[in-house]
Amino acid sequence: MSETKGTCLQTFIPMRNEPRSGAEMVSSLIFGESYTIIENQKDWLKIITEFDQYEGWISGNTYAPSTTYTQLVDTDFVEAFAKGEKILIPCGGLIPEGNKFILHDKSFELKFNLKPNHHLPLKLRLINTAKTLLNAPYLWGGRCFMGIDCSGFVQVVFKANAISLPRDTKQQITCGTSVSFPEIQSGDLVFFKKPDGENVSHVGLMISNTEIIHASGLVRIDKLSLEGIVIDKQLDYALIDIRRIVN
């Protein structure tokens, strides 16, 4: 393959830690995201993503030549229609400014399912975007409404609002500035460990000074206390840090 770059032109493409279909899914590309091919092994491509420099393997039959789209999707998904066909483009995906594109020699036109919220203050935009993903199922390595993990959820919500965050929780906890619990505000990121653990393993987004939205089983809203998140009368996540990305 002479091309060294490609673009995801599917709803999402799984990225795996080894070049085989049964390997662990470590992340995923979403529609419009581009990548560079760094290795080619039989029917598999090792790539590094343009957005967050994440490495993984994708199936070679998902390859599409590099295409540049610039408009961000800031709701759970938008629909693109062609005659007899439909593509769902997820939150954080990239679409053409003119709302039309050619794919597989067919002309697709975008239909938006929610009004844009670009006129709102940034914190409110983040919260609105996050809430459109409520009830999305949890999926390790997922980054869209069809399946999403905690750090993927936070990353795409911020990406949809033109803020770049790294992919993994252990990287995200280094972003922004640390604030104390009494100072907590909507838009802050809160990081957790397992009650019997030591290392950061979970993250969520504050939607008020008492409620957090996060991916745990599914994208859900829970109350936050100084201790952490209690679900069904049990401490599931112990609070370790609060980071302010947006002032």
Image (spheres, rainbow, N blue to C red):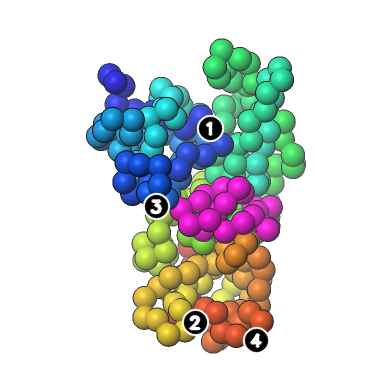
The residue to which callout 3 is attached is 24
At label 1, counting other C-alpha atoms closer than 10 Å, the crowd grade (few under 14, some 14-19, many 20 or more) is some
For the residues marked 3 and 4, what is the alpha-carbon distance in whole angstroms?
32 Å
Per the image, label 4 sits on a secondary structure element best described as loop
Residue 135 image offset from top left, x and y in percent: 68, 58
The residue to which callout 4 is attached is 233
Give the mark nearer the N terminus: 4 vs 2: 4
Would residue 141 be seen by someone viewing this image from the given angle? yes
Farthest top residue? 105
Q: Residue at x 54, y 67 (%)?
A: 204
In which quadrant of the rendered view does residue 95 lie?
Answer: top right
Q: Residue at x 74, y 39 (%)?
A: 113
Per the image, label 1 sits on a secondary structure element best described as loop
Residue 238 marker: 2
Give the camera-side residue of 168 and 41: 41
The residue to which callout 1 is attached is 10
For the residues marked 1 and 4, what is the alpha-carbon distance in whole angstroms?
41 Å
Query: Is 114 drawn above or below residue 234 in the view shown?
Result: above
Whether residues under marks 3 and 2 lie with C-beta atoms below 8 angstroms apart, the answer is no
Left or right position of 197 against 158: left
Give the mark nearer the N terminus: 3 vs 1: 1
Residue 235 image offset from top left, x and y in percent: 56, 84
At label 3, counting other C-alpha atoms closer than 10 Å, the crowd grade (few under 14, some 14-19, many 20 or more) is some
